[in-house]
Image (spheres, rainbow, N blue to C red):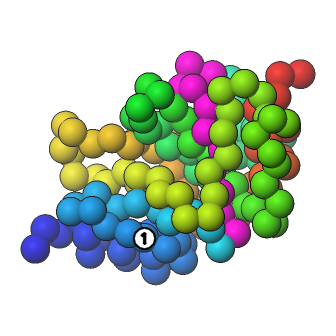
Amino acid sequence: MDSIRPRGDAFYSRLFGWSLKWRGTQPFLVLGSGICAVTLPKINGAQVLTRLAETGCEGPAIAVLTQQGPRVAILAESDGLIPPRISLPPHVEVLAWGALLPLPVDSGRAEAHAEWLSAPDPRQRWLPSLDAVLAGVRPR
């Protein structure tokens, strides 16, 4: 058995309490149970992550390859209230309730479809609120 799965389980499941689903050697975060992800085009990602850091609301962020092209997924804490799509800025989506988000693995594989832009910190396991992330996504 590949050593990626035990490392992924230890890091993501045991340390952070995240629910995982595995497809081969690729772990996926099962969104729900208070965790959602705000996604936007990667071209806008650095600016949004900077705004979130300026307000102290930074959290884990992943660059992912999707059918829509490269996107940034920012993990957030949801309180069960996900805003309707029409209320979000164009090209911004909120993934929740059973959606799967690929998680990075430190395997060095060239075919990896996810990489941390801002890795989760074991010393700071809280996630920013969905409202805070959405405030950072909207231009001032």
Q: Which image quadrant is residue 26 in?
A: bottom left
Query: Vertically, is 88 above or below 4?
Result: above
Q: Would residue 125 be visible to someone looking at this image?
A: no
The quadrant of the rendering that contains the N terminus is bottom left
- The span shown in magenta is 34-44
The quadrant of the rendering that contains the C terminus is top right
- The single residue placed furthest to the bottom in the displayed view is 14
- The single residue placed furthest to the left in the displayed view is 1
Q: Residue at x 51, y 32 (%)?
A: 71
The amino acid type of the residue labelled 1 equals Leu
Is 37 situated left or right of 7 in this image?
A: right
Tell me residue 130's x, y (percent).
78, 52
Tell me residue 120's x, y (percent).
54, 57
Task: Quickly name the residue at label 1.
Answer: 20
Categorize mark 1 by other alpha carbons within 10 Å: few (<14), some (14-19), many (20+): many
Query: Vertically, is 101 above or below 1?
Result: above
Q: Would residue 116 be visible to someone looking at this image?
A: yes
Q: Residue at x 63, y 22 (%)?
A: 44
Q: Residue at x 38, y 69 (%)?
A: 21
